[in-house]
Image (cartoon, rainbow, N blue to C red):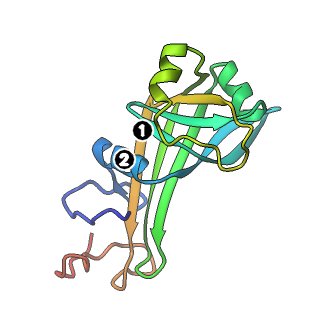
Amino acid sequence: MLVDFDPETPIDRNGLRMLSGDECMALLASSPMGRVGVVWDVLPVILPVNYVLDGDRILIRTVAGTKLAAALQHTVVAFEVDGYDPFDHSGWSVLVRGPAAELTDPVDLARISHLPLRAWASDEADRTMAIEIALLSGRTVFRGPGADGDGTLWDWHHGNGHRH
């Protein structure tokens, strides 16, 4: 899913269009794969995961290991999901930051049991990690056939050829 280019939304100092909270949530809901970033042995680790969005949290099935260890300590983690179109050089990225925790409440586990949350990497993934969406941000870029080499955006998407 790509984000429509809207010339009315703010552009950050790097020339990227900032996404609204609603756009970020829609993009999070549209993708089954993302990356979770944790600190392990004082070094950053980024791990690919499949997930589902459950209201204001991201759910991941996992086994004992790095991700679960972070969740058990209620560590603040990063979660990122993105998409791109190599033809028109457009893309988007959504970043979530928030505390991770293992879900252990039987009522909560029963409530989410109907969600399409199955680990792709291991049939033995029997634990559920939740990341609370405490901080949410997103950016999109559309360079397309009218972009300058310096990253200046041209509004070719809407056909008027104006610089942004």
Are discs 1 and 2 less than 8 Å apart at CB?
Answer: yes
Residue carrying label 2: 24
When asked about the image quadrant of residue 145, the answer is: bottom left
State the CA–CA distance, disc 1 to disc 2. 7 Å
Q: Nearer the viewer, residue 119 or 23?
A: 119
Judge the density around disc 1: few (<14), some (14-19), many (≥20) Cα neighbours within 10 Å.
Answer: some
Residue carrying label 1: 136
**Relative image position of residue 126 (x, y in whole percent):** 68, 31
**Relative image position of residue 42 (x, y in whole percent):** 79, 32
Residue displayed at 45% across by 24% down: 111
**Relative image position of residue 163 (x, y in whole percent):** 25, 75
Local secondary structure at mark 2: helix
Q: Which of 23 and 141 is in front in this view?
A: 23
Residue displayed at 44% across by 82% down: 87
Taking the view exactly as shown, the residue that stands out farthest to the bottom is 145
User: Which mark, residue 117?
Assistant: none
**Relative image position of residue 45 (x, y in whole percent):** 73, 43
Residue displayed at 60% across by 22% down: 101
- Amino acid at circle 2: Cys
Is the residue 145 above or below the residue 125 in the image?
Answer: below
15 displayed left or right of 154:
right
The quarter of the rendered structure image containing the C terminus is: bottom left
Local secondary structure at mark 1: strand
Judge the density around disc 2: few (<14), some (14-19), many (≥20) Cα neighbours within 10 Å.
Answer: many
Residue displayed at 54% across by 47% down: 80
Taking the view exactly as shown, the residue that stands out farthest to the right is 41
* Mark nearer the N terminus (1 vs 2): 2
The quarter of the rendered structure image containing the N terminus is: bottom left
Q: Which of 69 and 7 is in front in this view?
A: 69
